Image (tube, rainbow, N blue to C red):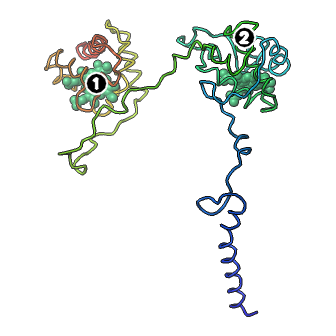
Amino acid sequence: MSRLANRIFVVSLLVAFMSALPAWADSHGKAGQYGIGKAATAEEIAGWDIDIRPDGKGLPPGSGSVEDGEMMYEEKCASCHGSFGEGVGRYPVLSGGEGSLTEPRPEKTVGSYWPYASTLWDYIHRAMPFTQPQSMSDDEVYAITAYVLYLNDLVEDDFVLTAETFTSIEMPNQDGFFLDDRPDTENTTCMEDCKDPASVKILSEPTMVTLAAQEDVAVTEETSSVDDKVYRQACQMCHAAGVAGAPMTGDKAAWAPRLEQGREKLLTGAIEGIGIMPAKGGQKQLSDQEVATALDYMIEQVKQD
Ligand code: HEC
Ligand code: HEC
């Protein structure tokens, strides 16, 4: 065959192959949008569809008691998580920690932190034991889940976990999780008579708060008689280094013209926001009184000689 004929032959083979693909896909299940692949069978989907919803939907038939779970847990889980869920070495702690969430070092466990018991069944079924995930039968997962709940004082020792009894479990921290309904932004979308985008300019770039500036604050702190807690938490990040044009704390020249407006006016600016400074420095949970305390601290830094 000549070179050209060879090429034509190869191309026509390709065309024949490609036009046959959808037919092939059809005969091997429903052809997808691109004429390739096949529709998954119900059985195949079931292999992936293993998630359990917070309301218990997805829990398979089966049951397991705290009593049965104890032995299985001891055998399959205790080597890492401890016999009482206390955690061996650095493996996760599974029990205890109640009431610790508001402490500086919260202990987040199934009992103290998790909002849904369904996660426990799902997680154990999906991922544990660590070295042999998905090796346990549904009944074993039920029993071990019941036992971990028992370790957290969430069920009695005669409890038997099933898809039905599941709904009786109340997780202590379930109300600690809720949808955040705060708006993403304060501004409303402009729909008419809007500014020409080309005329909108960013006037200043944020700069990093330098270590030196923070040290300055630390020094002035010792000499201050006003409480600087709120200032440090809510204002320092911008005012210590003059971020975005904020008048720097302690910079008398920058504050002089502002001080002339009087404390009341400054306070209004701090509470309601001024220029690009957001209201209360962006921390709306602060009371007006707290903002005033921070302001007084800032004023004191420029009044001192
Ligand atoms: C070989 C050690 C090992 C064994 C055995 C083991 N786990 Fe785990 N487990 C881990 C590790 C490591 C993690 C953390 C995994 C991660 O964060 O990715 C974990 C995480 C968990 C968590 C989530 C903890 C949390 O608060 O995030 C649960 C619940 C759990 N395991 C239960 C079990 C149960 C029940 C068994 C027995 C069926 C078991 N584990 C057996 C090592 C183990
Ligand atoms: C995100 C950065 C940022 C934070 C946080 C911030 N400010 Fe400001 N602040 C600015 C900027 C920028 C200005 C200058 C605004 C202008 O004049 O256009 C300013 C100005 C001010 C003024 C002068 C108001 C006036 O009328 O001239 C006061 C007072 C003030 N801030 C107080 C505070 C207090 C109190 C806090 C903490 C509760 C705080 N700021 C937190 C950026 C910030």
Residue 285 vertical placement versus 122 (above, below): above
In this rendering, the count of numbered labels is 2
Q: Residue at x 30, y 21 (%)?
A: 280
Q: Is residue 24 left or right of residue 197?
A: right
Quick one: SS at disc 1? helix
Say few, some or many: other residues with alpha carbon within 10 Å of mark 1 (under 14 / 14 to 19 / 20 or more): some
Quick one: SS at disc 2? helix
Task: Locate residue 33, reporting x and y percent.
Answer: 58, 60
Q: Residue at x 69, y 22 (%)?
A: 163
Say few, some or many: other residues with alpha carbon within 10 Å of mark 2 (under 14 / 14 to 19 / 20 or more): many
What residue did someone put label 1 on? 279
Residue 6 vertical placement versus 288 (above, below): below
Identify residue type, mark 2: Leu
Q: Quadrant of the N terminus?
A: bottom right
Seen from the viewer's position, the closer of residues 31 and 93 is 31
Q: In the picture, residue 247 is in which quadrant?
A: top left
Measure the alpha-carbon separation of dots 1 and 2: 47 Å
Residue 273 vertical placement versus 32 (above, below): above
Q: Quadrant of the C terminus?
A: top left
Identify residue type, mark 1: Ala
Q: Residue at x 68, y 38 (%)?
A: 49
Q: In the picture, residue 299 is in which quadrant?
A: top left
Seen from the viewer's position, the closer of residues 223 and 167 is 167
Give residue 151's mark: 2
Label 2 residue near ligand 1, CB within 8 Å: no
Can I make out residue 247 in this image? no
